[in-house]
Amino acid sequence: MDNYIVPQTKHTPQIELHYSDKYLRIAGDSYPENAMEVFQPLIERLESYFAKAQQSLTIDVLVDYQNTSSTKMMTDIIAKLQHFHETEHQIKLTWYYPEGDIDCLENCEMLLEDASFPYAITELKD
Amino acid sequence: MDQSSQDIYWKEAELLCEAKDLLQEIGEDGCIEASRYAELLHAYAALLKQTSKLTRLSDRDQKRLNNLLERLSRLVSPPLYRKITSGKEKLEINQTKRVKLTIFFSDIVNFSAHSLNMEGEALSNILNSYLEEMTNIVNIYGGTLDKYIGDAVMVFFGDPDFTDDFDHAYRCVQMAIAMRQKMDDMQQQWFKLGYSDPLHIRMGIATGFVTAGAFGSSERLDYTIIGSAVNLASRLQTAANEDQILISHDTWGLVKNQIRCKDGKRLKLKGFSKLMLAYEVQGLVSDSETSEVMIEDKEKGLLIRYDKSKTSPEEVVKLIRC
């Protein structure tokens, strides 16, 4: 399966899903006109990836600012990850927030408050 | 709901369809299948949770945006900030306008030399307290603070809030006088804090047409003004002595009935080929002791100024007749 790589644009984050490395990275601010276009292809690829039994995925997220549509899609992704975790897959997520940005930290905490898969919210030093 | 919003809520739309279908499947006994109802209830609970989370995050983002705007507001003058945030000013490059403004420049005389004799912390304390007080005065008089350049301050009146030429010039000169008065207070404070060398400011004011707008690159814009009047105000400031306010002839023409000035002097200023007429501001007419009387009629070529505490009107008439 080919890796799924979407470069960053002014309003959308970089998305890299490396199947062989079992690694997903989402990095950059997210203010697209249509968040569905940005995140739905990723959700579909995640569903395909986790269709096989006992998959594992390490995820790094570096998204400081996102519009409400992107937040909605992100909650969908987290809900999906939670579902995969509950169905015998291994998920490990790290959400990085800018150094000293307490608002961003608290937003991350809120986004992940219902997740029971292993996750960390880590300050990214300048 | 626009297309993109409809798209991201496709699952919720499906859920509604399911609920409708279930309603149609109600049997003759008025019952629905408990397991399907439980599924629906579970989905609605999840939906409510997500909606609640999105609302909280949205509220937090709004608060975050407000905090950011508050921080940004300190980087631009209040009139310009209001204009930008109200959406009236698009701040696009090449969008400039010609407008008649009154421009003000000030700096601390020999600040570089003073700074050599001060510790870094003391220097920043003095500079920040000075700029804080000066900025408060700018805001009181409704000026647009263009920029700080070290210890120098540049302010203009008439943009983005345009009233009339007299009002701009009068408020600007009043502001300069208030700044000079404030410096007296501050010098006493600094002296008590152990700074023995008094700091003095010098100020220059000019009125004229300038080009106002956003200058710079598409990445980084600076809302400012350019033009000969800007240069003149700057040069007048440089030519001023300690605690002096020099105003251009154009500014003087607007405020001469409200502001007491010494007679105009022609100054050689860098960048100006001819000698420029400048006036030293003494104070507000309303603040004067009212012992000085000035009678001026340009059409008749008349200019009489005398101190009525020393000379009576009769004596003046007598002197004229002589």
Image: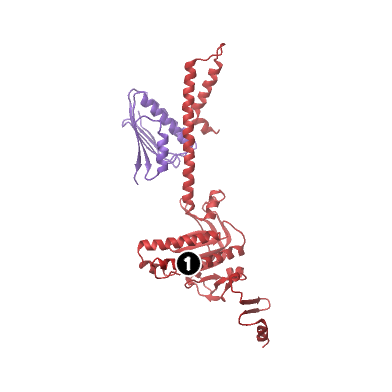
Judging by the rendered image, the residue that carries numbered circle 1 is B185
Q: Is residue B289 above or below residue A106?
A: below
Q: Residue B303, position in %: x, y? A: 64, 78
Q: Colour of chain A?
A: purple
Let me know if residue B232 appears in the view.
no
Chain shaded red: B
Residue drawn 57% across the image and 50% down it: B88
Q: Residue B95, position in %: x, y? A: 54, 54
Q: What amino acid type is highlighted by mark number 1?
A: Asp
Furthest residue toward top: B28
Residue B198, by quadrant, is: bottom left
Q: Is residue B11 above or below residue B148?
A: above
Q: Quadrant of the C terminus of chain B?
A: bottom right
Residue drawn 65% across the image and 76% down it: B296
Q: Residues within 10 Å of mark 1 (few under 14, many from 20)?
A: few
Q: Quadrant of the N terminus of chain B?
A: top right
Residue B276, by quadrant, is: bottom right
Q: Nearer the viewer, residue B118 or B246?
A: B118
Residue drawn 53% across the image and 66% down it: B178
How many numbered tags mark residues here?
Answer: 1
